[in-house]
Image (cartoon, rainbow, N blue to C red):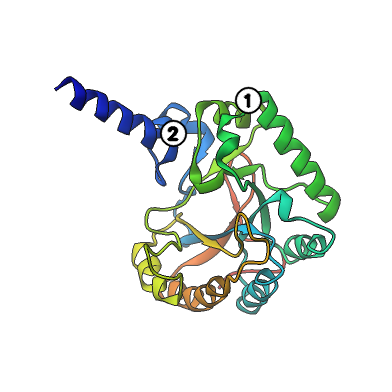
Amino acid sequence: MVLLFIGLAVAITALAHTAPFPFALDALHAGRVTWRMPHGAGPPTIYLTYDDGPNPAATPALLDVLAAERVPATFFLIERHITEETAPLVRRISTEGHAIGLHSHTRKKMLMAPRALADTLTQFATRLEAITGRPPCRAFRPHAGWRSSSMLEGLERIDYQMIGWGFMLWDFDLFRPRSVRIVPRLVRHASPGDIIVIHDGHHVNPRADRRHAIEVTRALIPALRAKGFQFGAICDAALGQARHSGPFQSH
């Protein structure tokens, strides 16, 4: 019986830091973690988010799809993927009305001291602002959603919000290659205020084949519109408002 309780305690502790959905640790930092955007009496809104870019092999075509559909999105970028080659792509993301948030290629950030994490993210944000001419969202998405109390304390120091995603609203497809076959699942689980995560990049390979992100987005947008959804971009640290912004007005 003792071993059972020990095992249960270990499992709960592990899930608190790694669960891809709200769990115990999030309750302790409720004002610092967002898994779903606020929604009121207005039109039902869905938030498309893209991780692990910028990816010169996929992000340009993805932006073309979003532009054709006139849909804003939020891109969580990895700093090491921002190079002389991809800086214009970052600028394009911003110019075309999308939001930019901060991402990471490693889970090690959950082990950083609060001040060190805050300094690291602030430097990253400054670099993004130098490229785009505007500050990024005060929003951070940790690698694989792994978080810790020290990470959330670091975010609080700089008034950043950790951004998660909705349950079953990810592009991971068990042991199958990621493809457009996930679209019915995403549509089935979508509800107002939900955040969908799709990977247009890879945390290691900066030029990964992410054609699925383009194909899924192309099929997903009209399917969600058919259910009455509009699209928003995550905007500010408090996340008390969302922007339907830039040159895009979703319809």
Q: Amino acid at mark 2?
A: Asp
- Element at label 1: helix
Q: Residue at x 48, y 29 (%)?
A: 29
Tell me residue 53's x, y (percent).
Answer: 66, 59
Front-most of residues 28 and 15: 15
Disc marking residue 229? none
Corner quadrant of residue 188:
bottom left
Residue 41's place in the image compared with 96, above or below, is above
The residue where tag 1 is placed is 114
In the picture provided, is 194 more to the left or to the right than 78? left
- Point out the image quarter for the C terminus: bottom right
Tell me residue 51's x, y (percent).
Answer: 59, 57
The residue where tag 2 is placed is 26
CA–CA distance between discs 2 and 1? Answer: 16 Å
Q: Residues within 10 Å of mark 2 (few under 14, many from 20)?
A: many
What residue occupies the far left of the structure in this picture?
A: 1
Tell me residue 50's x, y (percent).
Answer: 58, 60
Q: Amino acid at mark 1?
A: Pro
Q: Residue at x 40, y 71 (%)?
A: 182
